[in-house]
Image (cartoon, rainbow, N blue to C red):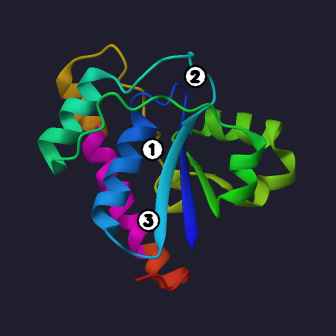
């Protein structure tokens, strides 16, 4: 099975939304997503607005999901590691230099230029915008994976 790891800062907004969107759209294919953060606060969970936007859009409940700190084992065992920004990608490539060939930004991987900015602490409309950015990029990602990796 192939697997993708989405990475953001705290694993409470962008990456956990990306994980939920990807797994919802892919359904039962032979590829799954997970998520982690580079700077997780112990005991933190998915932000209320992230959970609300995901529930509203795809009826998946990610509230109460505990944030996960990225580690070497995760980077080693995932097929592709997709950061939400170039800054996070640079940190990952520095900290896990032996795996630079599998670390990208999500939008770089699908040939888009923009960064996916952190909505943390902003209005619900910012979370909706982030959700729409992620969904668009993930649809492109799934199409690319279907072409490049022959997934279902």
Q: Residue 68 location, x and y as percent?
A: 56, 33
Name the mark on residue 40: 2
Q: Is residue 21 visible?
A: yes
Q: Are circles 3 and 2 on residues that touch, CB within 8 Å?
A: no
Instruction: Tell me which numbered mark, 1 or 2, is placed earlier along the sequence.
Output: 2
Circle 3 residue = 141
Q: Is residue 134 left or right of residue 52?
A: right
**Chief secondary structure of the magenta portion:** helix
**In what element is the residue under mark 3?**
helix
Q: Residue 15 location, x and y as percent?
A: 45, 40
Q: Residue at x 33, y 23 (%)?
A: 47
Label 3 vs label 2: CA separation? 26 Å
Circle 1 residue = 114
Q: Residue at x 55, y 38 (%)?
A: 36
Q: Residues within 10 Å of mark 1 (few under 14, many from 20)?
A: few
Q: Residue 102 location, x and y as percent?
A: 70, 59
| Residue 127 picture quarter | top left
Q: Is residue 116 visible?
A: no
125 above or below 134? above
Q: Residue at x 81, y 36 (%)?
A: 95
Label 1 vs label 2: CA separation? 24 Å
Label 3 vs label 1: CA separation? 15 Å
Q: Residue 143 location, x and y as percent?
A: 39, 74
Residue nearest the observer in this picture, 14 or 20: 20
Q: Residues within 10 Å of mark 3 (few under 14, many from 20)?
A: some
Instruction: Tell me which numbered mark, 3 or 2, is placed earlier along the sequence.
Output: 2
Identify the magenta region.
Answer: 131-143
> Magenta span has 72?
no
Instruction: Tell me which numbered mark, 3 or 1, is placed earlier along the sequence.
Output: 1
């Amino acid at each position: 099975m192939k697997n993708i790891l989405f990475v953001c800062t705290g694993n409470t907004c962008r990456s956990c939304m990306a994980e939920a969107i990807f797994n919802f759209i892919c359904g039962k294919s032979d590829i799954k997503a997970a998520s982690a953060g580079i700077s997780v606060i112990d005991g933190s969970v998915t932000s209320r607005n992230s959970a609300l936007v995901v529930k509203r859009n795809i009826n998946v409940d990610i509230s109460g999901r505990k944030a996960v700190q990225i580690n070497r084992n995760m980077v080693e065992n995932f097929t592709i590691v997709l950061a939400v920004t170039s800054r996070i990608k640079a940190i990952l490539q520095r900290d896990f230099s032996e795996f630079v060939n599998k670390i990208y930004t999500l939008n770089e991987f699908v040939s888009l230029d923009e960064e996916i900015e952190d909505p943390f602490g902003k209005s619900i409309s910012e979370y909706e915008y982030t959700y729409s950015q992620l969904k668009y990029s993930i649809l492109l990602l799934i199409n690319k994976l279907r072409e490049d990796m022959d997934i279902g």
